[in-house]
Image (cartoon, rainbow, N blue to C red):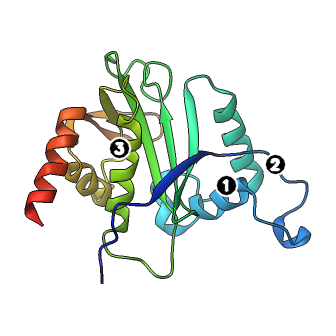
Amino acid sequence: MNTPAPGPFTFRPLDPSPSSQPSSSRGGPISDAELVHSWVTHPKAAFWLMQDAKLQDVEREYMAIAAHPHHHAFIGLHDGEPAFLMERYDPAHVELVGLYEPLPGDVGMHFLVAPTQTPVHGFTRAVITAVMRELFADPATERVVVEPDVRNEAVHVLNAAVGFEIAERIAKPEKDAYLSFCTREQFRTARAGEAAAR
């Protein structure tokens, strides 16, 4: 299998507007909420903690994110087609309030790659690399913060590959997590190391 090039990846804001009818009834394009619902309820998305969510639950969740001044959701596109979900948030206001001391320039991140019947080797790593590039494209971003479930071994490997280091284990209401950080310099070093290894 070939490893995909880390692009072309693009991002657009997720539109959580509920549809009056499901796409199967109206014969039109699938809504973002329907798309994301199919992703977050897939068995491979167990750590997203929405396995039993109904479409209305997903619409409600992302309507709340859209209305939140410190939380934003995006659909990631690969070759123009929806391929992953990215959320960015301010950890001083969302997810990690009271669990660590945020620094200026800290940005929280979640990402989820769409399930597929034909996985491509290296694609998820290319996605997380694109996500990190997108976050660091904002000059105000100094450090990316993540809090993956301690049991999510696959994402720990991916995080380490792009420069994250685990700081500590923390207890969140919904999970035990590894609080991890990646500075702009750590990401740059990880990318340089990967390029040198090719």
Question: In the rendered image of this protein, does residue 184 appear above or below residue 100?
Answer: below
User: Which dot marks residue 18?
Assistant: 2
Mark 1 lies on residue: 53
Q: Residue drawn 59% across and 46% down?
A: 12
Question: In the rendered image of this protein, does residue 91 appear above or below residue 119?
Answer: above
Residue 168 visible: no
Residue 36: x and y in percent read: 63, 57
Report the front residue among 20 and 139: 139
Q: Amino acid at mark 2?
A: Pro
Q: How many numbered marks, from 0 up?
A: 3
**Front disc: 2 or 1:** 2
Q: Secondary structure at mark 3?
A: helix
Q: Residue drawn 50% across and 20% down?
A: 93
Disc 1/disc 3 C-alpha distance (Å): 28 Å
Label located before the other in sequence (2 or 1): 2
Q: Amino acid at mark 3?
A: Met
Mark 3 lies on residue: 132
Q: Secondary structure at mark 1?
A: loop
